[in-house]
Amino acid sequence: MRKERKKKNGKVWLWRVLLILLLIVSLGLIFNEQIKLFVVDHMSQNSLNTAQQLTADDVANNKKNVKKANYTFKSVESLDLSVVSKAALNRNLKPIGLMAVPSVNVHLPILAGIANTNLVVGAGTMKPDQVMGKRNYALAGHHIPHTKVLFTPLENAKLGEKIYLTDMKQIYTYTISLDKVVDKSQVQYINDVPGKTMVTLITCASQMEGQPERRVIQGDLTSTKKANKKQLTKIFGAKVTKKVKK
């Protein structure tokens, strides 16, 4: 009798364990999107807070890794929980500047290359030879449905509004002149245009995952000014603790 009772109790506990595991997996599936959005929001905000303490020396040191960065478009993955989790484990990011579109409340670190770890938290440069304030400075960023993180708010940007970039030495002001939805194969928008100095922002065009269209926002350079503590704080939220180098 005791053996049968122990055997029966063992089966009961096994079923309980299986039910608990099933419940955990079910909850994970149900709240998968919410968990992902929470982690992305938290990571992007932490990365921005770190980047807002950049100095010109930090940027110069971080730029040494630009040539080693990943610029393979096909390697970019959609932001599922797996990609986000991998990015959370790799926090050794090296910002090379800051970008801001104040009219739609976009403030992000700029990172070299379009590695998934970069795009989870900020804007990634799309070409290895880019120089801020010269030619066509192209940046890519993710669009995440039903959020206000990363490049998502750019869907509300308007012609004539400003895009700001800084390397902590200069502040580059661009005026939006193009807002267009194109097929993802139309990569010519990131190419340099003879006689033009511009910025190009690329993101997904809608909230539908896997869709083939991209939103292209371009701005023409209208001003280049030396960075100072007041403007870095006002435009980018930078926490400047040292004197800005000239």
Image (tube, helix red, strand yellow):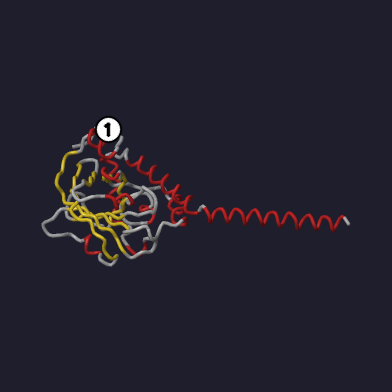
Which residue, as the protein is rendered here, is positioned at the far bottom? 185
Residue at 72% x, 57% y: name it: 14
Q: Residue at x 29, y 42 (%)?
A: 58
Q: Residue furthest left?
A: 195
The secondary structure type at the circle numbered 1 is loop
**Residue at the right extreme, as displayed:** 1
Amino acid carrying mark 1 in the image: Lys
Where residue 79 appears, as percent x and y from the top left, is: 41, 56
Is residue 232 at all visible to an observer of this figure? Answer: yes
Residue 70 position by quadrant: bottom left
The answer to whether any part of residue 60 appears in the image is no
Q: Which residue is mark 1?
A: 242
Q: Is residue 214 left or right of residue 40?
A: left
Expressed as whole percent of the image width and height from the top left, the position of residue 220 reads 16, 51
**Residue sitting at 28 percent across and 66 percent down?**
183
Query: Which x, y percent locates residue 109?
Result: 31, 46
Q: Quadrant of residue 69?
A: bottom left
